Image: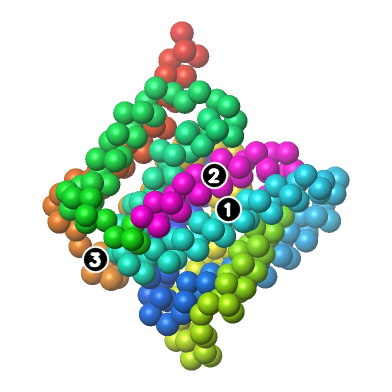
Amino acid sequence: MSRIQANLVLLLAAAIWGGGFVAQSSAMDMLGPNWFNGIRFGLAFLAVLPFAWREAKNATRPLATGDVIAFLVIGAVLFVAQTLQQIGIKTTTVTNASFLTGLYVVLVPAIAVLILRRRPHWIVWPAAVLTLLGILLLSGGSLSGLTDGDLLVMVCAVLFAVQITLTPIAVGKSGRPLALAALQFGVCALGGTLGGAALEPITTGAISGSLTEILYAGLLSSGLAFVLQIVGQRYTTAPQAAIFLSSEALFGALFGAVLMGDSLPAIGYAGCAIMFAAMLMVELVPELARRRVVIA
């Protein structure tokens, strides 16, 4: 796969995730967040399992214990992130949720410092300040405008940053992207089902009433898009991958406006623009500097 093809794969994943915010929001009218995640990731697990099985048959070596542990950890991080996002989206808009989730683009370098012991590029710090300004404007110019749902989605963005940081490391060591996808979906399905059984009522009517959203979130937003992310990140640079994946914020805002009638005040759109500019800065500036050094 060429780098251009990989970037297009990531763009497709971002578009699917953007539409997923609408499905996640609509499903909350019928299902609790844990049951929704349990069912959607159960579908994703079943959809990916045959491909993971074929990958295992063609593999040159079995998965090491360390690989399995890493996959399970990534799955646990994804489970907590998706749970917080799903709970948060009940009390925030699709537009807010999509842009606040996109904060992971700024957070990935900071998480990499803690995990990989790499010093961040200087551009990370002004980008972080711009991001905070963007959040302030997105909330209407006052921190009191942020809902509890917005705060949960912001925590979810930190966890997504961890998942994005760990994914290429785990796949690079194991060479088994589909195994990672299947195991992380299995963890999310089990966690969501257990949480739903303990905390949330459920009826067959609730499931049938949100079947369209479940199928979209399970087969496309979870099953397909996360696999596209894992595969695409193997064939492109981290800066380019983050840029294309962060476009989920724009797709989320677009789908929220078209399908759910979400709207923002003018200052909110300015906040969206500033946040997206920060996302681009933190990835583009280091890449351009590296290219200048190579040319020199």
Going by the numbered disc 3, the residue's amino acid type is Asp
Alpha carbon of mark 2 to alpha carbon of mark 3: how far? 29 Å
Going by the numbered disc 2, the residue's amino acid type is Val
Looking at the image, is 42 positioned above or below residue 98? below
Kindly identify the residue that appears in the image at 31 percent across and 40 percent down: 131
Residue placed under numbered mark 3 in the picture: 262
**Image coordinates for residue 201, horizontal then vertical, percent:** 51, 84
Kindly identify the residue that appears in the image at 43 percent across and 15 percent down: 292
Instruction: Give the quarter of the image for residue 153.
Output: bottom left
Q: Are marks 2 and 1 in contact (CB under 8 Å)?
A: yes
The disc label shown at residue 77, or none: 1
Residue 212 visible within the image: no
In the picture, measured across the screen, residue 133 lies left or right of residue 2, that is left
Mark sitting earlier along the chain (2/3): 2
Main secondary structure type of the part rendered in magenta: helix
Looking at the image, is 108 positioned above or below residue 58? above
Instruction: Give the quarter of the image for residue 44.
Output: bottom right
Alpha carbon of mark 1 to alpha carbon of mark 3: how far? 29 Å
**Image coordinates for residue 195, horizontal then vertical, percent:** 57, 72
Q: Are marks 1 and 3 in contact (CB under 8 Å)?
A: no
Of 289 and 68, which appears nearest the observer?
A: 68
